[in-house]
Amino acid sequence: MALLEVRDLDVRFALRQGEVRALRNINFTLDRGERLGLVGESGAGKSVAAFSLLNLIAKPGYIAGGSIRFDGQELIGLGERRLRRIRGNRVSMIFQDPMMTLNPVLTIGEQMVECLKAHRRIASREARAIALHKLQQVQIPSPETRLDQYPHELSGGMRQRVIIAIALLLDPDIIIADEPTTALDVTIQAEIMTLLLELCEKHNVGLILITHDLGVVSQVTQRMLVMYAGRVIEAGPTREIINDPQHPYTQGLMNALPQMATPGSHLNQIRGSMPPLSQLPSGCAFHPRCDFVTRADGSERPACSRQVPDFVASGNCRVACHMVAEMLAQEAATEEDRP
Amino acid sequence: MTAQALSHTETPTEPRRQAARPSDQENAPLLEIRGLRKRFDLSGDFLEQLRFKGGRLVRHQEFVHAINGVDLSIRRGEALCVVGESGCGKSTVARTVMGLLSPSAGEIHYDGTRIDDLSPKALLPYRKRMQMIFQNPYASLNPRMTIQQTLEEPIRLHHPDWDRERVTAKVREVMASVGIDPEWGARFGHEFSGGQRQRIAIARALAVDPEFIVADEPISALDVSIQAQVLNLLMDAQQERHLTYLFITHDLAVVEHFGTRVAVMYLGTVCEVAPTRTLFATPRHPYTQALLSAIPRLEDDRPQPIRLTGEVPTPVNLPSGCVFHGRCPHAEARCRREVPRLVAQADGSQVACHGVEEGRL
Ligand SMILES: Nc1ncnc2c1ncn2[C@@H]1O[C@H](COP(=O)(O)OP(=O)(O)O)[C@@H](O)[C@H]1O
Ligand SMILES: Nc1ncnc2c1ncn2[C@@H]1O[C@H](COP(=O)(O)OP(=O)(O)O)[C@@H](O)[C@H]1O
Ligand code: SF4
Ligand SMILES: [Mg+2]
Ligand SMILES: [Mg+2]
């Protein structure tokens, strides 16, 4: 059984103008020690998904349905006290902005000790020793000094190291990292990503890594989900999706990268932009931007604008696209015709 | 299913863009930055600077040394990209070039004329020839102005003699050229998406037919699919209007795609300038090497970034000698003592590194 199993997660925002469906039919699993990437453009619902996993979604958002099983236990509907025991203790979160986690008026040591004491019966002295050990693990220069410093006294890269140390404090099973390096520079980002990867591997910690950077996903994760307008539209092994994306949106995203074009030539842009969740088009949410609504022979595929595509299996991947489904069906039919 | 079946979105590749204007003026730079320095005073006004120390009042001043002796020249028709980590002084260079900040030392020459010491009136004709595009498409448009008003403003400033019809026609033309429906002139900025707003900001820069554009991270705030749209627009404009760009970014993939030449900055100084292909093929400065090795690649190999030690120093207390020495794997005694100068190399690049100069790197 997978460590984390998410089935048909349905998250909505109850807004004055009416209800907005933020996430629909989110399905995935995470095994112990596995690293999963969650990619998509801003506004696709990645952060809402991350917060929902720990039932941290803020009002007016709420979980309207589905199931989140962690280590065999259903989290939806679980009382706040039991949830809190899981949060931080077994599943911890890293945010893009370190100040979401750090308290500016406490020293690094004070907050780490406080966090340990909130979850374990432990003497201050022992807690401080654990805190120091974790700071050593994240390779912070002069860790003893850092314990007595305030967050503002540290550089951005060092703060993000402290955040990783705090995330590891209670030896969690899963770390959810929401754009952990987006605000950092590329050399610092490389250091932090390498560190996170090494620590997760060494301690067999699962990682859900949210990012919009396909290069980072490609380097760090084993499987990935691509989100568009509140849905997962493609899921599978990272290598396979990066090497051979099937969904027209994933293809478009990859092809739009400057690396994919000859220097100086036009980039392969996707026209238009992702619609807000409150104004989703009918059918496949990507259809107004998609080149495959018209078939190669010039005929229209009416389903694209009328019917939300279901997932079809293509190799080891799952893809939600009418065009892909049609091509797979055609391929299967020709196989059958063969004597 | 095969990859071929799905790959018809790929468009045939076009040849690399040529520099816009050939031959004769090639050697005279359009813009020349000489020994530019800019420091910001952090200590406030005179009274705030006074401290009581050892029984008497002393004046305490603290400066951010944002740029410390930058030399750069930009040729007509090229796109010079400036890269470097945040805080290294890229925006300060851009704003000083545009006359939005006055340099603490050094000179800026445009098309043969020194412009950093001109009066606002004498600068006006140059401000028509040079335009700027900013990073944040949300902040750069005045929320109380319609798109029509936003675009009319620079035209009226630089063409006070134009009649209403001519101004309106120009606004429509420039809107169409950036892919914004000219009928949308009566709308306000907030009615547009981030990508559309950046198009409008570009239209505003193009409205007075400039020859030189300073673009400060113009696509950094946009999503990948929108970045491609805006970058294509900037490349089209360069071709059609023979523009010269000073293009600031921290995205190396964009530099490799867009730049004619690249200047790499670190802590207020230029450490390497080279033609784009040369820089990516054979980076010479240890910082450039580390930067290129840190790009997360799509290819299937583990990241092997060059590990830098130490923290980025602050521009308040600049290190002695080479500003990179504290993180450099090749630093020696001379590096801690002496500031390296940009030295021309055989491959057409310029590198500011003692190790390279001494032939040990
Ligand atoms: N609590 C909330 N109430 C209403 N709308 C929200 C709330 N949280 C997020 N949203 C909206 O949901 C959409 C998805 O947001 P988010 O998950 O943050 O996207 P991503 O992380 O992929 O960039 C956005 O349009 C955002 O404005
Ligand atoms: N108006 C200002 N006052 C004080 N410091 C400034 C000001 N503008 C920029 N700086 C500082 O100068 C340095 C260079 O900044 P900037 O040119 O914006 O860097 P970049 O654009 O490369 O990120 C930074 O340390 C920044 O904090
Ligand atoms: S379902 Fe249709 S519109 Fe949506 S991505 Fe597939 S082909 Fe394009
Ligand atoms: Mg987010
Ligand atoms: Mg800047």
Image (cartoon, coloured by chain):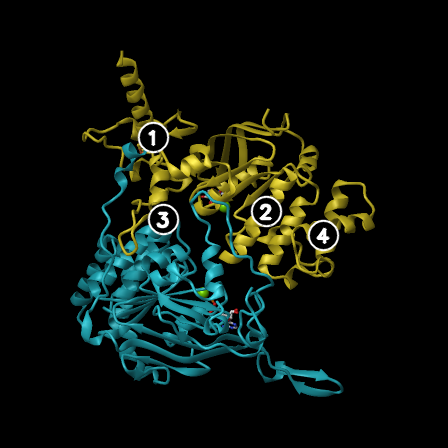
Chain colours: A yellow, B cyan
Q: Are marks 3 and 4 on the same chain?
A: yes
> Which image quadrant: the C terminus of chain A?
top left
Indicate the secondary structure of the residue bearing disc 4: helix
Mark closer to the chain start, 1 or 4: 4
Give whichever of discs 3 and 2 has the lower sequence position.
Answer: 2
Is disc 2 on the same chain as disc 3? yes
Q: Amino acid at mark 1?
A: Gly
Q: Are marks 1 and 4 on the same chain?
A: yes
Question: Which residue is outermost to the front?
Answer: B359
List the residue tagged with mark 4: A111
Disc 1 residue: CB within 8 Å of ligand 3: yes
- Tell me the quadrant of the picture where the N terminus of chain A can be found: top right
Residue B252 locus on image (x, y percent):
41, 57
Judging by the rendered image, the residue that carries numbered circle 3 is A257
- Assess whether mark 2 and mark 3 are in contact (beta carbons under 8 angstroms): no
Q: Which mark is residue B252?
A: none
Q: Earlier in the sequence, mark 2 or mark 1?
A: 2
Asked whether, in this view, residue A168 is left or right of residue B161, the answer is right
Spatial CA span between label 3 and label 2: 25 Å
